[in-house]
Amino acid sequence: MTDPRLSPLTRRAFLAGGAALGALPLGITRALGQQGEADVIIIGAGAAGISAARRIAEAGRSYVLIEATNRVGGRTVTDTALFGVPFDLGAARLNMPAARPMAAYGRAEGLDITRAPEGGRLYVNGREARDTDYEAFVATVRRAERAIGAAGDAGRDMPAARALPDLGPWGPSARFVVGPIGCAKELDQVSTVDFSRADEREGEEICRQGIGTLVAQLARPLTVRLETVARSVELTGRLVTVQTNKGTIQGRSVVVAVPPSVIASGRLRILPFQPRYRTAVEKITLGAYDHIAFRLPRNPASLAADETLYFKADGARAYMMRARIGGGDLYTLDVAGDTAAGLANAAPEAAAAFAREALTREFGADTAARMGKVHATRWSKETYALGAFSCALPGYGNMRRAFIETVGGRMVFAGEHAHETLWGTVGGAWLSGERAARQVLGLIGVRSG
Ligand SMILES: Cc1cc2nc3c(=O)[nH]c(=O)nc-3n(C[C@H](O)[C@H](O)[C@H](O)COP(=O)(O)OP(=O)(O)OC[C@H]3O[C@@H](n4cnc5c(N)ncnc54)[C@H](O)[C@@H]3O)c2cc1C
């Protein structure tokens, strides 16, 4: 058996930011009741909004945290009903070192968080690849990353696809890993500059109970107003005014922790909305990434728990697999970019047919015949996400900076899209929430560590 040897496919080492996460004493959770003005209004209870609210509560300030749906967590959500075991419909892994404080908190709370198996296994034409194929694949991915990174580092902000040399026979596979898997988009939709700023990640951790469970646990000490949809944020008066489906909320400042796609769609309006920020929400767009989850009993392909499998891509047919999630019978076939967007627009049976076809190609018809219940996510159709994660369109790699600025002296953004180097990750969303909290606390005259 060949050892898995694909290391996480990222570029640069970096120092993790963020202080250690302690348990938040309930006594200092200064959520605001129904009346009065809050120090900070936080819109969106995903990882970023939760992190911001915790920081603001720790500083002894009042907050109102509102969430459009009937649950916290946003793009982290663990389902246990579909397959009877934890299944992360969104993020399934924590990237280290950025998410280390979250993992430490989870462990302290008794969650089972462990290092994910390193690298992955590679299949070619229905069988595990030879050593030379592994080497060729990894070398091609690295060449692609280096070429795009070099263009971005040189400030040539263009479609990442155009920065690539001829990649040879492993080109489609490398393009899939670097584009759809890494950026949720085909490389012609990826800015070289945004790509080149993405930090290297040290490794991944998995939570047996699910990443969604961990994030929901982090929200437990907080007061969250669920099913409260922000429709507009007005920055013109003495106070910030947020109109919601359940009335008006006023505060001294606001953290907008919703995906940029929600603002670009007009579901949340910001008044006034300067052209710079409009451009940012329109050009830092969310791509498509989905899990097609299915049961496959009795481990027919002899795979280890939580293994990642790559396959030699053939044109548009590209996917990645997470095998035997949690050591059981649950698998996901991960699709991204144009394939994910196409399946999200197709009939519900299309994803199951796609997975069955992939299993037949890679492991044979007998294995495919054992495929049980299937469930496919469609993140681009979720009203309050409208996509999977962000990546700048070509020519707009520098626009992400707009999400780190203070707007009108009282509004800041948070979210994975609002982290310049850790975009697309839960850890990045978390750190952006901490940064946003520090900013708003500064605006309302509170010094924070
Ligand atoms: C399929 C998939 C796989 C992924 N895999 C990984 C992975 O393995 N590792 C990783 O690190 N990252 C992964 N990610 C990315 C990760 O999930 C996100 O980067 C992160 O969860 C984003 O957090 P956030 O707080 O920025 O946004 P969100 O989680 O989207 O939170 C925003 C919140 O705002 C709410 N909201 C929206 N509009 C309004 C409104 N008008 N009023 C009130 N509330 C509103 C939403 O309902 C939501 O709860 C994956 C994403 C997907 C979709």
Image: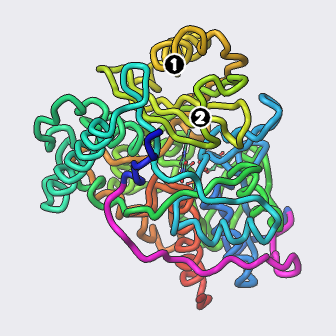
Q: Quadrant of the C terminus?
A: bottom right
Q: Which residues are magenta?
A: 10-33
Magenta span includes 20: yes
Q: Nearer the viewer, residue 138 or 333?
A: 138
- The residue that label 1 is drawn on is 363
> SS class of the residue under badge 1?
helix
Please give left or right for residue 221 compared with residue 437 in the image: right
Residue 17 image position (x, y, % from top left) = 50, 77
Distance of label 1 from label 2 (alpha carbons):
12 Å
Q: Is residue 390 above or below residue 293?
A: below
Task: Considering the whole magenta stretch, tell me its main secondary structure.
Answer: loop
Residue 136 image position (x, y, % from top left) = 24, 40
Count residues near mark 1 (Cα–Cα under 10 Å), then give few for <14, some for 14-19, many for 20+. some
Q: Please give the name of the residue rendered at 34% of the width and 45% of the height, measured from the top-left corner.
A: 283
Q: Please give the name of the residue rendered at 82% of the width and 65% of the height, measured from the top-left corner.
A: 110
Q: Nearer the viewer, residue 314 or 420?
A: 314
Residue 411 appearing in the image: no
Q: Please give the name of the residue rendered at 73% of the width and 35% of the height, measured from the top-left corner.
A: 328
Residue 345 image position (x, y, % from top left) = 50, 17
Residue 364 image position (x, y, % from top left) = 52, 12
Give, as a three-letter code, the residue at label 2. Leu
Q: Earlier in the sequence, mark 1 or mark 2?
A: 2
- The residue that label 2 is drawn on is 303
Q: Nearer the viewer, residue 123 or 70?
A: 123
Which residue appears farthest toward the front when viewing the image?
1
